[in-house]
Image (cartoon, rainbow, N blue to C red):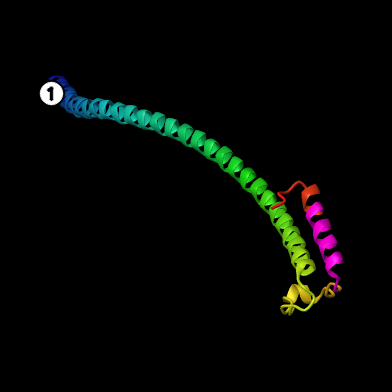
Amino acid sequence: MNHSLGVAIESLVAVLLLVTIGYCMLLNNRLKRLRSDEHSLKAVIAELITATEIAERAIGGLKHAVRDVNENLGNQLAAATSMSEHLKRQLGECDQVVRRLSKITIAARPQGAVEPEPEPAAATRPPPPRASSARAVAAAAQAFSERRRSGGLAA
């Protein structure tokens, strides 16, 4: 009985060794796949790092472009504002010139001439008084000298 018990124990140990060897082979195959996956994972990580660096450079370039556009737009806006103010001043001066010219033409007009119908803006102002020819010449000269003093052209 001792002898059969020893053979049974030895057989059990042999079977367990075979199962262990089979399991080790299975683990070895899995480790090989894991190592091959590790290499492909490293390649993917390297590609991601490269793509991230490219994206960071692109973002930096975009920020620089936005800054340049913002400065350019600000300069253009400031120039447009100053041009608008300049045009407003010129329109005001033009309005004054038109008023002076109308005064000159009214003063230079003979007394018997027919007056044109006033425009709606001129309708709110009282009509200028009729002047004699000497007074008309004086008024025209005065309007001319006012124009000359304001720094504009006389003609």
121 or 59, nearer to the observer: 121
Residue 81 lies, in percent from the top left, at 66, 48
- x 36%, y 32%: residue: 51
- Give the overall secondary structure of the magenta segment: helix
> What range is drawn magenta here?
130-145
Compared across the picture, whether 47 is left or right of 94 comes to left
The correct choice, above or below, for 113 with respect to 83 in the image is below
Q: Which residue is mark 1?
A: 4
Residue 110 lies, in percent from the top left, at 77, 73
28 or 5, nearer to the observer: 28
- x 46%, y 33%: residue: 61
The residue sitting at the front extreme is: 134
Q: Residues within 10 Å of mark 1 (few under 14, many from 20)?
A: few
Compared across the picture, whether 125 is left or right of 92 comes to right
Amino acid of disc 1: Ser
Compared across the picture, whether 69 is left or right of 93 comes to left
**Is 136 within the magenta?**
yes
- x 81%, y 57%: residue: 141
Residue 138 lies, in percent from the top left, at 85, 60
Q: Secondary structure at mark 1?
A: helix
112 or 90, nearer to the observer: 112
Residue 108 lies, in percent from the top left, at 77, 67
Question: Which quadrant of the figure contains the N terminus?
Answer: top left
| Residue 15 figure quarter | top left
**Is 119 within the magenta?**
no
125 or 136, nearer to the observer: 136
